């Protein structure tokens, strides 16, 4: 008996690598597909169905290792109707003995007609006794890992099903209202579907058993997120109640009026900041919608209330844009705005840190440098994180922790990458979401064209003409240095080419590997109008605001994602001149690249682009760093199961309205094992 313990321990460790630690984890490890082993056809019948997957049964009449052209095991089986070759290109010595002459075998695979007649290549097979019964249900195929065979998984799952508590965690009235199957019935059917089941509904996950699993998964996620929101509201935060002299003077000094959408969103944020629990709000707005001024007005409310605010951006260029714009608004009103980035000289960095720690700096703007251990704040009341999806959870928490152990600051996260409604409902259910859905007046529409790069000379002529009319041009490239693998035009080569082709124009170059001071000098020259053409990598993706720039050329546009293309296009169209975005592409285009370029030509609506981006990429890639280390939904599909998301959200709210509801605890224990791994921070 002692010999069995290491074996079990090894199996447990292999299962643990798949995240299968409890019996319920195993029970909810559902098949990814099924094989139909409920029927055996004759070898002759299978031959007539060539190209289809069939299961045959026969006795081994020949077994040999051949070398044509490489080492392979050839096993011939026969039944009353004929013979069939089973070909194994990779095999173990034990298989040669196992498939010896006279052995009865059941084999399943797609049957092909090769040079030596009918054959199956690498079939799944079983050695059986004559008259062995056929399975009565479809055979599940599970997601697996190294050293875990399907047989081991099936046995472990079957044994776990005999030990779990099957009591339903969704109340009967709710199951009836949503026409949901019972939990145990649904799970057993998915592990052991009968042979006569609707195979299409099973495969597309539209079967009622799959619907029940999707609903339960979504309900667990919604409950977890909403509970996180509730627990946050029980923590103290400074009530930033004052919108006094600074806020009033700031609004009065602005050279423009807020749009209706900006005013509405500002009202939502102000109401949140007045609460004694921490705001957790996501501010969404399309490129150029005016999120920065709203964030600055939120910071003014914190300062009016006697607290500090901090704004963190993912790149120095974006942080610098914020600093210049907000400091120009606030410093004439007597506000001390500090600037803190990694590239500052040690003396300047220490000075900025001292201003934050003493409270002299009422607003601190910077990059990741804000979360260094050496940076502390006197009274941090509001944290603003721009392009929040570019930061990991840990980085955002580190900034929030700067308020000290006894207080949680309010948090405003901003994103110019609009998040589709279903995605926001699912993955941001713990956040309040504000949307600026209106662009400032006077913005010019952007016309987008896709052009084969063979027409590069025409594009250069267009750049020259635009510059002679007094306009400025961005030319964006995806790489800095030559890559033989991708063969992309590089920023450095393009800069040299354009400088030669346009000798009467000032052509600048900016990329991520330049020294910050050199980068800033180029950006300043472009912003002032002294430079007509700016060749850049994607460092100008967000935050750059030059109203006179009206032409954007994106080199190798097929290499960029939709979100990035939309962000880059948003650098033009910020003034009154009509603006154009030219997408240079390399033929031939793949299917996904065609979809992206077509979308860019058809719409400038960030939310529509985000919806299509979600369709193309799926939620995992779309959400980026926010999901780092977090499990994605395994069963629900946000595109096709939107009605279930809404039902789960509504039911989660209803269940949580009952204090200490045991149903909530039981459901979360079943689906998240008490860990609540879906919690977002």
Image: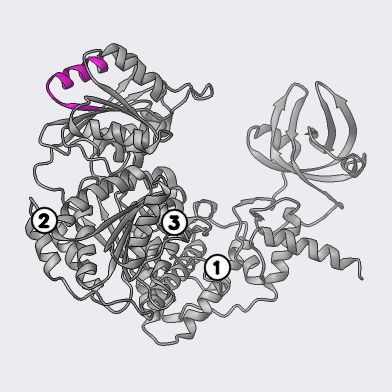
Q: CA distance from mark 1 to mark 2?
A: 53 Å
Provide the secondary structure element on which disc 1 rests: helix
Query: In the image, which residues are magenta?
Result: 460-473
Type of colouring: one colour
Mark 2 or 3: the one toward you:
2
Provide the secondary structure element on which disc 2 rests: loop
Q: Is residue 280 visible?
A: no
Does residue 539 appear to the left or right of 198 in the view shown? Answer: left
Q: Residue 449 occupies which quadrant of the picture? A: top left
Q: Position of residue 539 (x, y in %)?
A: 36, 37
Residue drawn where x is 28% and y is 62% of the image: 361
Query: Vertically, is 52 above or below 162?
Result: above
Does residue 167 appear to the left or right of 408 in the view shown? Answer: right
Dot 2 crowding, Cα within 10 Å, few <14, some 14–19, many 20+ = some
Q: Which residue is mark 1?
A: 186
Q: Nearer the viewer, residue 393 or 46?
A: 393
Mark 3 or 1: the one toward you:
3
Does residue 250 appear to the left or right of 124 in the view shown? Answer: left
Does residue 242 appear to the left or right of 93 in the view shown? Answer: left
Label whose residue precedes the other's in the sequence (3 or 1): 1
Q: Nearer the viewer, residue 342 or 455?
A: 342
Q: Which mark is residue 626?
A: 3
Q: Residue 617 occupies which quadrant of the picture? A: top left
Residue drawn where x is 35% and y is 33% of the image: 518
Q: Nearer the viewer, residue 477 or 422?
A: 477
Residue drawn where x is 18% and y is 34% of the image: 446
Q: CA distance from mark 2 to mark 3?
A: 30 Å
Mark 1 or 2: the one toward you:
2
Dot 3 crowding, Cα within 10 Å, few <14, some 14–19, many 20+ = many
Q: Which residue is mark 2?
A: 258
**Residue 233 highlighted magenta (yes or no):** no
């Amino acid at each position: 008996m002692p010999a069995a313990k290491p074996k079990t321990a090894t199996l447990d460790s292999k299962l643990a690598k798949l995240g299968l630690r409890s019996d319920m984890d195993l029970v909810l490890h559902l098949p990814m597909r099924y094989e139909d082993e409920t029927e055996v056809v004759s070898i002759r019948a299978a031959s007539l169905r060539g190209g289809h997957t069939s299961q045959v049964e026969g006795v081994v009449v020949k077994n040999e290792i051949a070398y044509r052209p490489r080492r392979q095991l050839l096993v011939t089986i026969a039944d009353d109707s004929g013979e069939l070759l089973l070909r194994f290109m990779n095999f173990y010595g034990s298989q040669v003995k196992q498939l010896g002459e006279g052995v009865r075998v059941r084999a399943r695979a797609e049957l092909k007609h090769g040079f030596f007649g009918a054959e199956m290549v690498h079939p799944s097979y079983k050695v059986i006794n004559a008259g062995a019964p056929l399975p009565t249900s479809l055979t599940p195929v599970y997601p697996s890992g190294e050293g875990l065979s399907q047989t081991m998984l099936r046995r472990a799952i079957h044994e776990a099903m005999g030990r779990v508590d099957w009591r339903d965690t969704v109340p009967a009235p709710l199951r009836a209202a949503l026409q949901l199957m019972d939990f145990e019935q649904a799970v057993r059917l998915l592990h052991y579907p009968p042979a006569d089941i609707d195979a299409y509904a099973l495969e597309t996950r539209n079967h009622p058993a799959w619907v029940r699993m999707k609903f339960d998964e979504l309900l667990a996620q919604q409950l977890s997120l909403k509970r996180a929101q509730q627990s946050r509201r029980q923590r103290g935060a400074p009530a930033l109640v004052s919108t006094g002299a600074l806020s009033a003077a700031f609004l009065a000094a602005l050279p423009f009026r807020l749009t209706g959408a900006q005013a509405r969103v500002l009202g939502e944020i102000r109401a949140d900041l007045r609460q004694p629990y921490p705001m957790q709000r996501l501010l969404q707005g399309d490129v150029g919608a005016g999120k920065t001024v709203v964030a600055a007005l939120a910071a003014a409310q914190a300062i009016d209330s006697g607290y500090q605010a901090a704004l963190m951006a993912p790149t120095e260029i974006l942080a610098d844009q914020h600093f210049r714009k907000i400091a120009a608004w606030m410093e004439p009103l007597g506000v001390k705005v500090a600037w803190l980035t990694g590239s500052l000289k040690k003396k300047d960095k220490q000075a900025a840190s001292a201003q934050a720690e003493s409270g002299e700096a009422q607003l601190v703007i910077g990059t990741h440098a804000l979360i260094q251990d050496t940076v502390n704040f006197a009274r941090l009341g509001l944290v603003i994180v721009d392009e929040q999806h570019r930061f990991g959870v840990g980085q955002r928490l580190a900034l929030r922790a700067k308020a000290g152990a006894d207080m949680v600051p309010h948090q405003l996260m901003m994103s110019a990458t609009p998040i589709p409604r279903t995605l926001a409902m699912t993955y941001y259910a713990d956040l309040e979401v504000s949307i600026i859905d209106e662009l400032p007046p006077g913005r010019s529409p952007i016309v987008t064209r896709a052009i084969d790069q063979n027409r590069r000379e025409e594009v250069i002529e267009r750049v020259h003409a635009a510059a002679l009319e007094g306009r400025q041009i961005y030319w964006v490239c995806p790489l800095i240095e030559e890559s033989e693998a991708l063969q992309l035009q590089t920023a450095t080569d393009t800069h040299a080419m354009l400088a030669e082709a346009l000798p009467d124009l000032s052509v600048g170059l900016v990329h991520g590997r330049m020294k910050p001071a050199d980068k800033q000098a180029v950006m300043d020259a472009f912003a002032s109008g002294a430079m007509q053409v700016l060749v850049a990598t994607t460092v100008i993706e967000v935050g750059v605001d030059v109203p006179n720039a009206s032409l954007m050329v994106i080199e190798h546009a097929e290499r960029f994602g939709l979100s990035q293309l939309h962000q880059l296009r948003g650098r033009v169209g910020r003034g009154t001149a009509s603006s154009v975005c030219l997408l240079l592409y390399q033929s031939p285009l793949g299917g996904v690249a065609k979809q992206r370029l077509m979308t860019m030509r058809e719409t400038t609506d960030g939310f529509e682009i985000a919806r299509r981006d979600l369709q193309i990429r799926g939620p995992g890639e779309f959400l980026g760093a926010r999901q780092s280390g977090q499990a994605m939904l395994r069963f629900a599909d946000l595109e096709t199961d939107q009605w279930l998301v809404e039902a789960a959200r509504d039911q989660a709210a209803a269940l949580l309205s009952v204090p200490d509801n045991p149903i909530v605890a039981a459901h979360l224990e079943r689906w998240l094992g008490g860990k609540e791994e879906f919690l977002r921070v």
